[in-house]
């Protein structure tokens, strides 16, 4: 439920109502605004009804939250949430580009790619140390060695880092080395992992599952936020459809829907969304135009020798051109690059 207080209500009045909500075993939320204070109550609405808050002299109105995802909804949090990866804010004026290789393969490969994306203007560095692959015979990543390489590349370039976490047991290890977690499409509904990430405070880039609806994605985010971690970034990365011309179908319809429905920042991964190097740049521009807060792009210093996703990874010079060509699109959307 959403409880909107009257303008004359004080912090003490809000605290008194919050205490009554908590005493019933419900989860209270305190959201002070410029004109009035809004409170939230997450839990059994039948229990909340017993408080008869609509009769409270300082309550203007009580409204039910109709969506199943309560805490990530704009109903309860109308203002945009800005999530910081290191010092980089995502969800504000800046159009953020996170770039790097799909997989960390070696010290030299990661260092060269990190320097290339930094020079081109990327804001954060990505790289996979643990790689869940469709085939058990494909390269699975370097594990902890890869995390150390990523951390060193980030320090050398001054870029904040993000990497994929694939198991709940790996969360403390990944947290030591990276500035943000990434949850891949295959793990979007790994609820044990999401719950563990909710008990951390580092940002989580949550990718949409390849067969997931937008509501599925928002409910997955709800798992993380409801455990206490508000730092979630939603990522559209394409879904499986009957179309075979591209690896996935990049669902850019989801961007304005997510921005309208949720207060969380939204980024787009055109690399996985298309699976084709030549399509990454046009879809990146389209993502900026339709209101995304940023991009997640695969770049490799030598894609033809990449151990993972070489066909969709940009060459450094292609990424540099993309960053230049993105500027007018970001500006037209009211963003800075």
Image (spheres, helix red, strand yellow):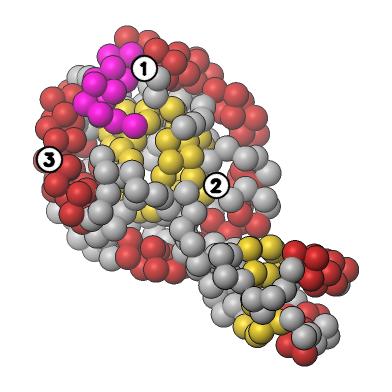
Query: Tag 2 or tag 3, which sits nearer the N-term?
Result: 2
Q: Are marks 2 and 1 in contact (CB under 8 Å)?
A: no
Q: Residues within 10 Å of mark 1 (few under 14, many from 20)?
A: some
Query: Along the line of sight, which residue is nearer the eye, 276 or 200?
Result: 200
- Kindly identify which numbered label has been placed on residue 54: none
In the rendering, at what x and y percent does residue 205 appear? 46, 44
Residue 105, percent across and down? Answer: 36, 18
Residue 325: which numbered mark, if any? 3
Q: Is residue 15 above or below residue 8?
A: above
Q: Is residue 264 left or right of residue 229?
A: left
The N terminus, quarter of image: bottom right
Above/below status of 145 relative to 182: above
**Marker disc for residue 157:** 1
Which comes before the other along the chain, label 2 or label 1?
Answer: 1
321 in relation to 316, above or below = below
Farthest residue toward the front? 8
User: Residue 149: x, y in percent?
Assistant: 44, 15
Which residue is found at the position 22% from the left and 32% from the top? 313
Q: Quadrant of residue 280?
A: top left
Give the left or right position of residue 202, taking residue 27 as reference.
left
Closer to us: 247 or 268? 268
Which residues, given as a range, are shown in magenta? 111-123
Alpha-carbon distance for marks 2 and 1?
A: 24 Å
Q: Which residue is mark 2?
A: 231
Quarter of the figure with the C terminus: top left
- Residue positioned 63% across, 63% down in the render: 32
């Amino acid at each position: 439920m959403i409880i909107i207080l009257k303008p004359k209500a004080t912090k003490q009045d809000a605290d008194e109502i919050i205490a009554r909500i908590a005493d019933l075993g419900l989860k209270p939320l305190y959201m002070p605004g410029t004109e009035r204070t809004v409170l939230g109550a997450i839990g059994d609405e039948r229990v909340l009804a017993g408080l008869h808050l609509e009769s409270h002299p300082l309550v203007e109105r009580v409204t039910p939250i109709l969506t199943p995802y309560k805490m990530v909804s704009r109903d309860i949090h109308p203002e945009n949430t800005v999530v910081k990866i290191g010092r980089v804010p995502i969800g504000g004026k800046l159009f953020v580009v996170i770039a790097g290789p799909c997989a960390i393969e070696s010290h030299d490969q990661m260092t060269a790619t990190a320097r290339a994306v930094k020079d081109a203007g990327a804001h954060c560095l990505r790289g996979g140390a643990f790689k869940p692959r469709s085939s058990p015979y494909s390269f699975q990543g370097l594990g902890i060695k890869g995390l150390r390489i990523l951390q060193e590349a980030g320090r050398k370039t001054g870029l904040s880092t993000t990497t994929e976490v694939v198991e709940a047991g790996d969360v403390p290890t990944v947290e030591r080395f990276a500035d943000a977690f990434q949850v891949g499409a295959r793990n979007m509904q790994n609820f044990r992992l999401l719950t563990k990430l909710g008990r951390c405070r580092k940002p989580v880039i949550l990718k949409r599952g390849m067969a997931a609806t937008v509501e599925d994605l928002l409910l997955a985010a709800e798992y993380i936020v409801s455990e206490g971690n508000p730092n979630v970034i939603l990522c559209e990365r394409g879904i499986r459809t009957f179309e075979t011309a591209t690896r996935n179908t990049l669902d850019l319809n989801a961007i304005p829907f997510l921005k309208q429905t949720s207060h969380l920042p939204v980024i787009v991964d055109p690399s996985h969304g298309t699976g084709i190097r030549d399509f990454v740049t046009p879809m990146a521009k389209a993502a900026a135009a339709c209101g995304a807060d940023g991009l997640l792009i695969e770049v490799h210093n030598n894609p033809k020798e990449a151990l993972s996703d070489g066909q969709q990874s940009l060459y450094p010079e292609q990424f540099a051109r993309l960053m230049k060509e993105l500027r007018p699109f970001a500006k037209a959307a009211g963003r800075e690059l």
